[in-house]
Image: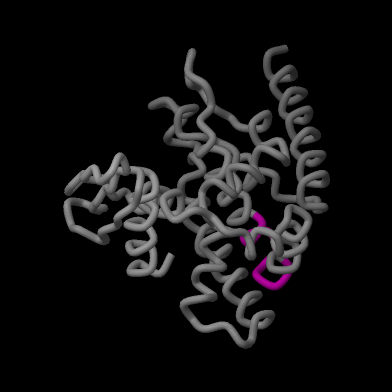
Amino acid sequence: MGRIVDILLFKKSDKALQSFLRSAFHISTRRPELYREALRHSSSLNELNKKIKQSNERLEFLGDTVLDSILAHYLFDTYKSQTEGELTKMKSKVVRRENLNRIGEKIGIRSMLEVELGNQEIHESMLGNALEALVGAIYLDKGYNDTRNIILKFLIQYGLTETIHDEVDAKSRLHEWCQKNKKTLTFEVLSHHQNSGASLYTISVKIDQSSMGIGTGNSKKAAEQVAAKQACESLMI
């Protein structure tokens, strides 16, 4: 009886998965196990099922690379007058964590995630990570050319052109880059002067204790933005 119940639940989850894939990416699959893995957070694995199941971390690694390749190809073909640095900045706007998290939320990844966090809430970054893992699953399922067409249509549907031309403030870009690359970001006030009631701050931005830029402004926020912009230009993000 228990085995029959397990099979029925499995078929039900497959049906929900196929419905999700049609709604989000306009695709179907004969390899649902790939997509279940893409939606499986590491918190859902215990010592026993680690031997028979993978979390989505490996697919996330693959999907991140495939997504970069698809966007690089698209931007190279579409924006023929842009320099390498400008194309890099355009790509970074699309793959930045905040944007992927936003899209992941919109397509309903939160309700599809296999996750065990107890009383903790699902962190937004899990949605963006799972979205990258889904790109990896589509690539293994469909091959590069079909994946490129599927993902470009998908990204266009969720504001690709608008995102490319959106101006993201430098401090947010830098913060996201440091998170993605596991770097420590700090802002240090070097000086603060008052002149006729007006403040002037000088602030240094450091990544892993290395100074990457110095900014001045009439407020801490303004000085931090100037310093962050210098750092972003240096890192080409």
**Residue 144: in magenta span:** yes
Report the label total.
0
Q: Position of residue 64 (x, y in %)?
A: 51, 58
Q: Position of residue 141 (x, y in %)?
A: 67, 58
Quadrant containing the N terminus in the rendered view: top right
**Residue 37 appears in view:** no
Relative height, residue 219 to residue 145 (above, below): above
- Residue at 73 percent across and 56 percent down: it is 159
- Residue at 21 percent across and 45 percent down: it is 193
Q: Which residues are magenta?
A: 138-146
Q: Position of residue 197 (x, y in %)?
A: 30, 39
Quadrant containing the C terminus in the rendered view: bottom left
Q: Residue furthest front?
A: 196
Q: Residue furthest bottom?
A: 81
**Residue 172: in magenta span:** no
Relative height, residue 12 to residue 91 (above, below): above
Q: Main secondary structure of the magenta part?
A: helix
Question: In front: 203, or 179?
Answer: 203
- Residue at 62 percent across and 55 percent down: it is 135
- Residue at 62 percent across and 59 percent down: it is 166
**Residue 98 appears in view:** yes
Question: In front: 211, or 21?
Answer: 211
